[in-house]
Amino acid sequence: MGGFDGKRVLVVGGSSGMGEATAKLAAGAGAKVTIASRDHDRLAAAAKRVGHGVEPAILDATSDASVAKFFADRAVWDHVVISAGAGGRGSIKELDIAAAQAAMDGKFWASFRVAKAATIAEDGSLTFVSGGLSQRPAAGASVIAAINGALERMSIGLALELAPVRVNTVSPGPVDTPMWDRYGPDQKKKFLDGAASRVPLKRVAQPEEIAEIVLFFMTNRFVTGTVVPLDGGSSRA
């Protein structure tokens, strides 16, 4: 994949999963990649896995001060990718309001902060990662569905507001990422197998497949204001 030699790419949430896969694909194509998150140890481990001279950087996108400090040098990025956020699962009757607000802050408002602060080249791009629940909400995931939906609507508006910078969103269905490891191997397998059974392709996505769409957004210079569902056909079933 061409067009990346010397390009500066920032991946917020690049220490694992889809963000890490995006960093690896872009770095392998010749980009100068920085991966950012708030966990030093996870960043260091991800940088070793990615290779290609990727640079780790501490950034807490839930903190106004951390974001302001990170972007204070006003360095120009060719491409910025935001793949961050977790939490928010649970019935609305049982989910603590503070936990719901934290989930919103960790994904929607984190993306807002980075989009507001980053300086992106005019021929560059900003890409968000949302999630398929925005199109097909599920019981116990209404908060996540709302967060993803808000992120997608914001990205469409920013495509107009930030033009000629291109702004797009990839909306993945179920993806096999380390996010599920916290539930233990048995529960993770049960969830992913159940998710796969509801996907027309009868499997879940791998992080690299999401990363390929993100790099498409970077290289195709006539794509903006687009939300691409990458869900194995789930949103059409």
Image (cartoon, rainbow, N blue to C red):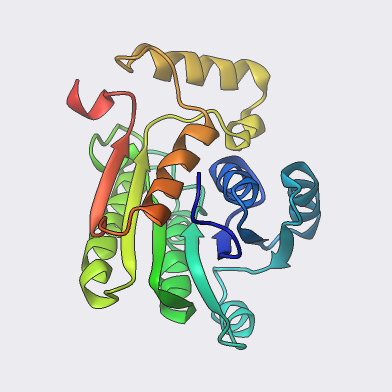
Q: Position of residue 110 (x, y in %)?
A: 47, 66
Q: Residue at x 78, y 60 (%)?
A: 40
Q: Residue at x 58, y 32 (%)?
A: 180
Q: Is residue 45 above or below residue 80?
A: above
The residue nearer to you, when weighing 198 against 87, is 198
Q: How many marks?
A: 0
The residue nearer to you, when weighing 66 against 3, is 3
Q: Is residue 63 visible?
A: yes
Q: Residue at x 67, y 24 (%)?
A: 184
Q: Position of residue 183 (x, y in %)?
A: 62, 29
Q: Is residue 95 visible?
A: no
Q: Residue at x 41, y 68 (%)?
A: 124
User: In screen coordinates, is 181 left or right of 102?
Assistant: right
Which corner quadrant of the image does residue 97 belong to? bottom left
Q: Is residue 107 above or below residue 88?
A: below
User: In screen coordinates, is 57 left or right of 102?
Assistant: right
Q: Is residue 52 above or below residue 154?
A: above
The residue nearer to you, when weighing 198 against 88, is 198
Which corner quadrant of the image does residue 55 belong to? bottom right
Q: Quadrant of the C terminus?
A: top left
User: In screen coordinates, is 93 left or right of 67?
Assistant: left
Q: Position of residue 28 (x, y in %)?
A: 64, 46
Q: Position of residue 139 (x, y in %)?
A: 30, 32
